[in-house]
């Protein structure tokens, strides 16, 4: 399973719903189970980029980054 952001959903499934679709990552096929909002990766003024999120136990890496949602408006 995989969560993708809105930009990735629009880019790869422009004519339909990305939910339930599958994508290949390496040798594995993953099903899109949710679509997340956009997240700034490096700078507050950057344009949204296609991005995907994998469950921690599905793809653990020691350099993981925590993304937190706050009530602060930018």
Image (cartoon, rainbow, N blue to C red):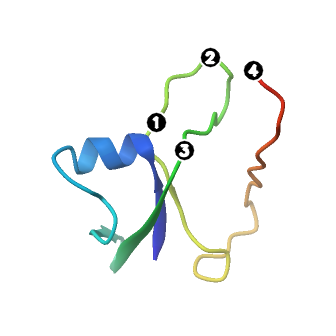
State how far apart marks 3 and 1 are (Cα).
Answer: 11 Å
Residue under pointer 3: 37
Q: Mark 1 points at which residue?
A: 49
The span from disc 1 to disc 2 (Cα, nearest Å) is 12 Å
Q: Which mark is first along the chain, 4 or 3?
A: 3
Going from N to C along the chain, the mark reached first, 3 or 1, is 3
Instruction: Decide: few, some or many residues near mark 4? Use Cα within 10 Å; few <14, some 14-19, many ≥20.
Output: few
Is the C-beta separation of discs 4 and 2 under 8 Å? Answer: no
Q: Residue furthest left?
A: 15
What residue do we see at 28% from left, 42% from top?
A: 11
Determine whether label 1 and label 2 are within 8 Å by CB.
Answer: no
The residues bearing labels 3 and 4 have C-alpha atoms spaced at a distance of 15 Å
For label 1, count other residues whose C-alpha is less than 10 Å away and answer few (under 14), some (14-19) or many (20+): some
Q: Please state the horizontal and vertical placement of residue 63, each as a whole percent of the image.
A: 74, 60
Residue corresponding to mark 4? 74
Q: Residue at x 54, y 44 (%)?
A: 37
Q: Disc 2 marks which residue?
A: 45
Check the image and report above or below for 52 versus 38: below
Q: Quick one: SS at disc 1?
A: loop
Horizontal side, residue 23 vs residue 36: left or right: left
């Amino acid at each position: 399973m995989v969560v993708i952001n809105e930009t990735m959903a629009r880019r790869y499934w422009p004519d339909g719903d990305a939910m339930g679709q599958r994508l290949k990552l390496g040798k594995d096929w993953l099903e899109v189970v949710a679509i997340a909002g956009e997240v700034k990766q490096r700078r507050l003024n950057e344009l949204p980029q296609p991005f995907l999120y994998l469950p921690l136990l599905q793809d653990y890496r020691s350099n993981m980054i925590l993304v937190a949602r706050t009530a602060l408006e930018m």
